[in-house]
Image (spheres, rainbow, N blue to C red):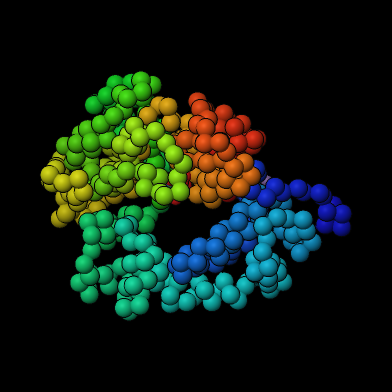
Amino acid sequence: PKPSADPPATTVKSYACQRRTPLKHHNTFLTDALEILAENAEFNENEGRSVAFRRSASVLKALPHVVRGMDDLKNLPCLGEHSVRVIKEILEDGTSSEVESTRQSEQYQAMKALTGVFGVGVKSADRWFREGLRRPLDLIHTGQKLNLAQQAGVQYYNDLNRPVTKREAVAISHIVEKAVNAVLSGAIITLMGGFRRGKEVGHDVDFLITHLEEGAEEGLMPKVLNWLEEQGLLLYQKTTRNSYLESKDGPARPPHNLDRFERCFSIFKLEKGKEGSGTSLNTSYDSGTTEGITGTTEQPGPSWRAVRVDLVVSPFSQFAFATLGWTGSKLFERELRRWAGQEKGMSLSSHALYDSKQRYLRANSEEEIFAHLGLEYIPPSERNA
Ligand code: CTP
Ligand code: MN
Ligand code: MN
Ligand code: MN
């Protein structure tokens, strides 16, 4: 076949939520490079730059072929001048000097290592970097004041930076089902995030919990957490309201939703071998606080590992929005909200969709939300933007 002499009219839509993006694509050699630059921009708190690189990478993920030359980039949306320069360098020289020097830079490496600690964000990592810290262990050696999340992050650093397998995610699902069923019958538990999109590994396991009977889910989270703690299955947990509730630019919403949408960032203790059996002999924990590290003297050994788990409870009326919002990818979500706002004058969140006249648009499925937004339905496995 003739290479790119007569390039096929590959039309790529400009919003990621208008395109199908499979998990495995043809241009990893380019997207990995662009995503290093995106990550580095995040470390420098340059969000605009970071999003620009992520959008460029995402366009290449949606292509049905390998990019072999600059001609293949013709008519593609979202490719800014900087991204094009990086791509050109890689196509011509095999590597990009900017990407390689970023990858090797002390700042990038330290920020990567420090933000790799659960509970450590870019701001703290940057402050520590400027104080001369480079590795997670430096936090201990220099006696930094750490919050409970960060303490757990350091304690379980190795486990939490080891990918969670699909098999482990299924084992965690069984534990979560057992916990939820123990405190409320008839709840629906759905695996979200990367695993719902078909990933084989993840950095955590995400669950959305709801109940057909509106209101039955209220107060569920603390009960589930108590059950898990009693079984010795929780190493850390922190329950918070959805950040949506605090966002100033969120849409108007009924006040009765205010306390209903809870999420929990947690670390589970997963027994190896007898995965899913649901019990552990180690039950030392502090039940008196809403945030706590349990079993602080324990270290992951041959018999168990620590796994990051996110739990979200949604009332059934918001379940479709919560499902769409927690499936990801992060860029896909961002693009959905941007599409809603910029193209439709609507406002989309994990709770609701409001039209340009601030009218609430009901939806019982993800398909209905895409339809409200005037978008073709994209299944979860094609949302890997
Ligand atoms: N999410 C969110 N608010 C957060 C964290 C995550 O709404 N503070 C949503 C994201 O928008 C995403 C989903 O939760 O849709 C899953 O996020 P995350 O677990 O961080 O990423 P995954 O896509 O699951 O990838 P990974 O395998 O790395 O976990
Ligand atoms: Mn393909
Ligand atoms: Mn996840
Ligand atoms: Mn998550």
Q: Which of 385 and 301 is in front in this view?
A: 385
State whether residue 346 appears in this view.
Answer: yes
State whether residue 28 appears in this view.
Answer: no
Q: Residue at x 19, y 39 (%)?
A: 229
Q: Which residue is drawn at 43% across and 30% down?
A: 319
Q: Residue at x 29, y 21 (%)?
A: 185
Specify whether 211 is left or right of 37: left
Q: How many marks?
A: 0
Above/below status of 21 relative to 30: above
Q: Which of 1 and 254 is in front in this view?
A: 254
Q: Residue at x 78, y 58 (%)?
A: 74
Q: Nearer the viewer, residue 322 or 311?
A: 322
Residue at the extreme front: 357
Residue 358 placement (x, y as % from top left)? 52, 36
Above/below status of 24 relative to 322: below
Q: In which quarter of the image is residue 78?
A: bottom right
Residue 299 placement (x, y as % from top left)? 21, 55
Q: In which quarter of the image is residue 143?
A: bottom left
Q: Which of 175 and 186 is in front in this view?
A: 186
